[in-house]
Image: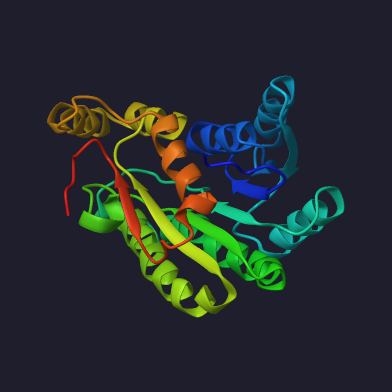
Amino acid sequence: MFELKDKIAVVTGAGRGIGKAIATVLARQGAKVAIADLRLDEAIKCEKEIKDNGGNAIAIKTDVSDLSSVKEMVDKIHDTFGKIDILVNNAGWDKMQPFLETSPELWDKIIAINYKGVLNCVYCIAPDMIEKNGGRIISISSDAGRVGSSGEAVYAGAKGAIISFSKTMARELARHKITVNVVCPGPTETPLVEEMKQDSERNKKIFDAMARIIPLRRMGKPEDIAYAVLFLASDEANYITGQVLSVSGGLTMM
């Protein structure tokens, strides 16, 4: 079940955290995985770990906010593996601050990575799937994009945009047998979250409070998100499209 043998997948932001877990799980199920990340050293480490465990992967330095960089990434995947079957838009970034303490420069960076990065990748990769008459696009949004999150106004807005964009693409691409779905993690133990907690005592208190009120009594782990992505990437999910799956331990229920 959830067999991905010989499927070609690209996971953005896959050098660490949730992206690394997704790349690892997809490779374990037989996919050939492109690890696209701006941090090439971390992507190479992920590639090595996958190969050491019998998987097939390639690390590619990619800036998802730059369309030309994404096009170069796609060309390298074509040369190495072939046309792409699965796209996981995972790359993301945030700096936790009350909105009135932020700057337009910060807004631009958050939107470029979290939202424009998704646009760039879908724009460059969906043609592969149309040519193959099938494919899977899974974007990692956030529960912040569904219900809001203190200190993450612009990030929540960008993640909400991913949800609306994905629903529209699900409609436009359905005739090509391409499914488009969204996974929304709740608070998850990742290097980015640790960095935000270290930024200020206020941020740490917010995350600690969220952890206490999660019904399952723990923060998420990257693997929790990865297995949800695996299901949506599989043939078993071929009648699911335009949907939003929250993986939050019950923190949000709607």
Tally of numbered discs:
0
Query: Which residue shows up at 28% across the image and 28% down it?
Result: 219
Apparent side of residue 175 relative to residue 208 in the rendered image (left or right): right
Give coordinates of residue 36: x percent, y percent. Answer: 66, 45
Q: Please tell me whether residue 19 is drawn above or below residue 122 in the rendered image.
A: above
Identity of the residue furthest to the front in this view: 1
Q: In the figure, residue 186 lies in which quadrant? A: top left
Query: Which residue shows up at 81% across the image and 58% down it?
Result: 75
Identity of the residue furthest to the right in this view: 79
Query: Which residue shows up at 43% across the image and 32% down it?
Result: 222
Give coordinates of residue 95: x percent, y percent. Answer: 39, 44
Apparent side of residue 208 relative to residue 180 in the rendered image (left or right): left
> Which is more toward the observer, 240 or 50?
240
Q: Please tell me whether residue 3 is drawn above or below residue 116 in the rendered image.
A: above
Q: How is the image coloured?
A: rainbow
Identity of the residue furthest to the top in this view: 52
Apparent side of residue 164 relative to residue 92 in the rendered image (left or right): left
Give coordinates of residue 122: x percent, y percent. Answer: 59, 66
> Which is more toward the observer, 202 or 77?
77
> Which is more toward the observer, 250 or 212?
250
Give coordinates of residue 16: x percent, y percent. Answer: 55, 32
> Which is more toward the observer, 142 or 156?
142
- Image quarter of the C terminus: bottom left
